[in-house]
Image (cartoon, rainbow, N blue to C red):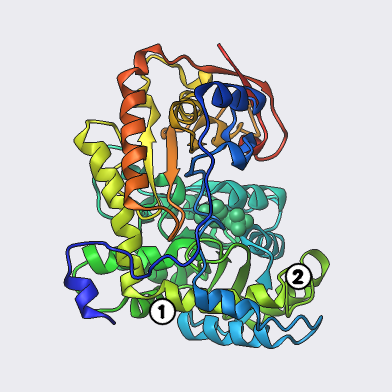
Amino acid sequence: MNTEANIRHSWAEPYKIKMVELLTMTTIEERERAIREAGYNTFLIRSRDVYIDLLTDSGTGAMSDRQWAGLMMGDEAYSGSENFYHLYDVVREYYGYKYFVPTHQGRGAEHLVSSIMIKPGDCVPGNMYFTTTRLHQELAGGTFVDVIIDEAHDPASSHPFKGNVDIRKLDRLVQEIGAERVPYISLEGNVNMAGGQPFSMANLRELRSYCQERNIPIMLDATRTIENAWFIREREEGYSGKTVREILREICDLTDGCTMSAKKDALVNIGGFFACNDEQLFLKAQNLVVVYEGLHTYGGMAGRDMEAMAQGIREAVMEEHQAARIGQVRYLGEQLQAAGIPIVRPIGSHAIFLDAREFLPHVDQDDYPAQALAAELYLEAGIRTMERGNVSAGRDPETGENRRPALELVRLTLPRRVYTQAHMDVVAESVKAVYDRRHEIRGLKMVYEPEYLRFFQARFEPL
Ligand SMILES: Cc1ncc(COP(=O)(O)O)c(C=O)c1O
């Protein structure tokens, strides 16, 4: 642990730049054309038309020289690659689970867990939904039930652990349907849809003892759990003297298994895994992975990708990395707060979330205010962000109506180790410029709606 990094005030990066990628600057006319051609959906803009890309922190981080060197060590044997064994050792060391199955990315692992553990008619409680996670649960015949604390649905609440599970809500569900119809609880670290909000260790301990008494496994979505560990250290009593690495391990030891999108915390462009402690569950996952992903010693990844991931995990638990990562997000968030722009509080680890309801109170939720705001930010300065509101939430399978979630957000997601402080200043200035002309912004009409995960490919027209 680098104690100097812990006591310093600046969040300066613990690396220097060795190679750069040139960006395109566009004119307003070019951006108008690009967003129109993209059907006002930022997912459909070509990346060459984007100046600062805050669409996602998924697979967009910059790898270190050591990770690039690792690519050269790729052992591309179909079976038994050395890189698989190296990655397995690293996952065991840092996450601690006994068994491990690589997958091509997070949703590959979600598919395995959902199809093995969920029976039709089951309910899967979770601390707020994630899009792909919930869809896999539904495709397996389950129903997702939100058991996160109420504060998570209130963008203005500054509760330090908005990712906590409300054990009373969970108990109500268990009492109603019986523990045998709850195959597991889906627990996400640094809850993405709530604004990157952590759970506390105290809450996890309480959850653990509740679940143990009823034989309900806890499946962790470990995608951003290292960042969750940072917040536990920063905010929870008794943890200020522990390392991120120790806290990560403590979290994992209180759970039964995890799915992982390595494209976030683990600093790689592609990859994921499923890990668990139960041998029978592992054997089923190991068998199923060969059907959907690839052999159990590569799971859809190249050997070189597994090597880069092993090194990425080592770098992700470094205190100085997390100090800079979370420091940069906070730097941007504090500028927006100072300008009076409504954002989700407290500032999370991976993104700033604009509260589109407050930003555009004159736009009805069925006219997709967050989608419209994301399009405006692109028009303003070529900054690409993502809607996390009514479009992402999709339709209720029972009623067919839009779900109209409590949170109607635009996510400005920071790729890891990619942009500079000056880029953050440009983003803050651009959001302020859009805020100043917010009264002119109108909503959107959806003109094409795909069946699954509609936010990726839906098309819109201005009202
Ligand atoms: C919390 C969470 N879980 C799961 C996933 C799915 O992972 P992937 O995109 O690697 O399939 C994501 C991706 O954004 C995520 O943020």
Quadrant of the rendered image holding ligand 1: bottom right
Mark positioned earlier in the residue sequence (2 or 1) = 1
Where residue 237 sits, quadrant-wise, is bottom left
Q: Residue 289 got which mark?
A: 2
Q: Label 2 to label 1, Cα distance in Å? A: 26 Å
- Which residue shows up at 41% across the image and 79% down it? 249
- Depth check: 219 or 344 in front? 344
Give the x, y percent position of residue 460: 62, 22
Q: Residue at x 47, y 60 (%)?
A: 187
The residue shown at (65%, 40%) is 453
Residue type at mark 2 is Val
Q: Position of residue 59 (x, y in %)?
A: 57, 58
Can residue 207 be seen at all in this image of the molecule? Answer: no
**Kind of residue indicated by mark 1:** Arg
Disc ID at residue 285: none
Q: Quadrant of the N terminus?
A: bottom left
Q: Is residue 366 above or below residue 121?
A: above
Q: Is 461 situated left or right of 417 in this image?
A: right
The numbered mark at residue 249 is: 1
Disc 2 packing (10 Å; few <14; some 14–19; many ≥20): many
